[in-house]
């Protein structure tokens, strides 16, 4: 049985808030609160996959300190824009 959409979004919001690096908690929880409810299934799949990445890598991608893997390019760009607002 697949996870209901509302449960999935709630789980991902919780994982966005409880990372390991405080900066990523703040960045991802703000992004999740603003965007997850409006995402389609493919967007949620990609974000869910991103949540499995290492916080140090995520932080470097979002802040432009390291190259972003192609699969996450647009998503990281969107997260970085949210973070900079």
Image (cartoon, helix red, strand yellow):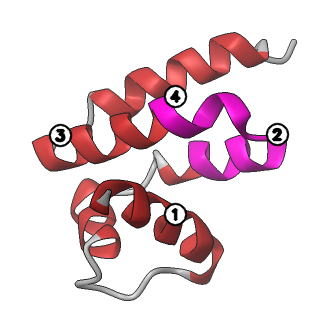
Mark 4 Cα shell of 10 Å, populated few (<14), some (14-19), many (≥20)? many
Q: Nearer the viewer, mark 1 or mark 4?
A: 1
- Label of residue 78 in the image: 1
Sequence order check, earlier mark of 1 and 4: 4
Sequence order check, earlier mark of 1 and 2: 2
Spot the residue most to the right: 1
Q: Quadrant of residue 4?
A: top right
Q: Which residue is mark 4?
A: 12
Q: Which residues are magenta?
A: 33-48
Q: Quadrant of residue 57?
A: bottom left
Residue at position x 24%, y 48% in the image: 24
Q: Specify whether 5 is left or right of 18.
A: right
Separation of marks 3 and 1 at Cα, in angstroms? 21 Å
Rendered position, 29 above or below 4? below
Separation of marks 1 and 4 at Cα, in angstroms? 17 Å
Residue 41 counted in the magenta span:
yes
Q: Nearer the viewer, mark 2 or mark 3?
A: 2
Mark 4 near mark 2, Cβ–Cβ under 8 Å? no
- Label of residue 20 in the image: 3
Spot the residue most to the left: 22
Q: Position of residue 78 (x, y in %)?
A: 52, 63
Q: Which residue is mark 2?
A: 41
Separation of marks 4 and 3 at Cα, in angstroms? 15 Å
Sequence order check, earlier mark of 3 and 1: 3
């Amino acid at each position: 049985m697949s996870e209901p959409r509302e449960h999935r979004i709630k789980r991902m919001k919780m994982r966005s808030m409880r990372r390991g690096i405080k900066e990523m908690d703040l960045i991802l929880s703000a992004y999740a609160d603003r965007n997850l409810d409006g995402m389609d299934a493919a967007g949620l799949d990609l974000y869910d996959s991103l949540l499995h990445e290492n916080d140090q890598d995520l932080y470097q991608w979002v802040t432009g300190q390291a190259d972003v893997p192609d699969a996450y390019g647009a998503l990281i760009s969107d997260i970085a824009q949210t973070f900079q607002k």
